Image (spheres, grey):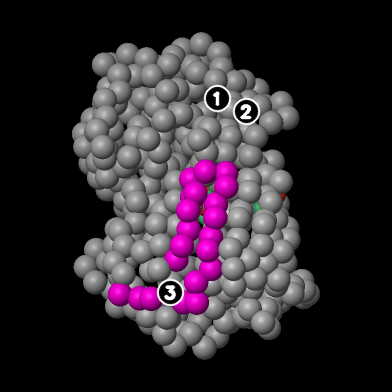
Amino acid sequence: MLDVLHVTGGGCVGGTLRVSGAKNSALPILAGTLLVNGIVQLRNLPHLQDVTTMIGLLNLLGARFLVEESMHLEVDTRDIHCFEAPYDLVNTMRASFLVLGPLLARFRRARVSLPGGCAIGSRPIDLHIKALQQLGAIIEVKNGYVHAVAPNGLVGAQVVFERPTVTGTENIMMAAVLARGTSVISGAAKEPEVVDLANFLNLCGARITGAGTAEIKIEGVPALQGSCDYTIMGDRIEAGTFLIAAAITSGQIRLEGVHPKFLSCVLEHLILTGAMIDQGDDWIALDMQGRRPRAVSIETEAFPGFPTDLQAQWLALNCIAEGEAVVKENVFENRFMHVQEMQRMGAQLTLCNQSVTSQGVRALHAAGVSATDLRASASLILAGLVAQGTTVIHQIHHIDRGYEHIEAKFLNIGCKIRRSLHQGAEERTEKAVQ
Ligand code: EPZ
């Protein structure tokens, strides 16, 4: 039985939320524990399907865990005895591919299933492979697996990424930490999650400088020591999702546990919609003062540009905002699966190549819709908040991968949302038109 979400439109968002730990920090940092011959403490881990999957993978490799209260995790990677990430796990979650670099660096071998594509694109990993080879890895791709060995250990090198890749940068940075000599990654991804990973590794004894810029320098060290205690950063994408929820409903929200500097581009665009923004070191407040947002065009880019992970949520905003705007997706080749779902709800959208032009309408109308990827599912909740009637969202397993306690958070800010088990078609239709 698959769960569905019922979202009843009307009313506006109002309240305060604490943002969960960042999924896209937690995953590489968990993979990074494989580099440590010891015990580490990780705090502020989000309670997410993807985090559970990564913990399951590390457990399969031989890591041991002690789950403290509220996702404070103790990870012991002294007895890693398996070096294979199997198809079923990597296929469940692409980020499992992040164990390749650490296993190769510390154990000089790894067998990792090729991550498949997904709803948003083919998601190649050619840049990861090429960069690891530049560090001296001998890699063969056969039978759907990447077989990698480094019999004499990895050797520091100059690695150039012809385009920024977040997990590519993270995989290579981790591999270089235990390489002999110094590595320099040029064309590195600048995402805050790359910086969070570097901070964790440096706390364990790595020597990484330049994370957050296009050039990262890693001086190889013989080993990383345990007994470090690290707190994962707040999830800027979750924060952006809830800021847009307040904007789309002409409401107000205060988010705690997130650094505004990681959302500068999004905040600039929210101000253009007419939002009043206030901020501190680790909090952001948005107030629409009851006004309908103005439609604002965006183009997704690598950090510090507008994040592709907030593109679908922004499109939902433009659906009911005043005026015409264009959303252009430059990062992934197929990240508009949510467009047809929003059109079912009455959105006036025209998709042409990698751009969607919207004509804002006053309100959408409820419908039965299906989520297609993690962020698209969040955008359908936002659309449901401003639809007349109750929207029923199917395939919400996508959403549980990336948003912790999603209903509780929306309920906490005044939204009408509930989860139920899958319904028959007739009941689904009846509900949707209520
Ligand atoms: C990370 O994916 C995130 N995932 C994604 O978040 C995010 O959308 C993406 O970065 C972009 O910001 C995690 O951090 C776990 P990329 P990643 O490599 O690293 C191309 C979410 O919803 N490319 O930066 O896989 C690729 O096709 C997820 O939380 C190659 O061509 O993305 C894409 O067009 C979705 N060859 C572009 O680079 C490669 O070897 C950027 O991809 C690698 C990537």
Q: Nearer the viewer, mark 3 or mark 1?
A: 3
Instruction: Name the residue at 63% across, 48% down.
Output: 186
Q: Which residue is mark 1?
A: 298
- Whether residue 74 can be seen here: no
Mark 3 CB lies closer than 8 A to ligand 1: no
407 drawn magenta: no
Asked which quadrant contains residue 105, the reply is bottom right
Q: Secondary structure at mark 3?
A: loop
Where is residue 114 drawn, in percent x and y? 68, 67
Graded by Cα atoms within 10 Å as few (under 14), some (14 to 19) or many (20 or more), the crowding at tag 2 reads many
Give the image location of residue 192, x and y in percent.
44, 46
Distance between the alpha carbons at the discs numbered 2 and 3: 42 Å
Magenta-colored span: 206-227
Q: Where does label 2 land, which residue?
A: 328
Whether residue 162 is situated above or below residue 141 in the rendered picture? above
Asked whether 52 or 381 is in front, the reply is 52
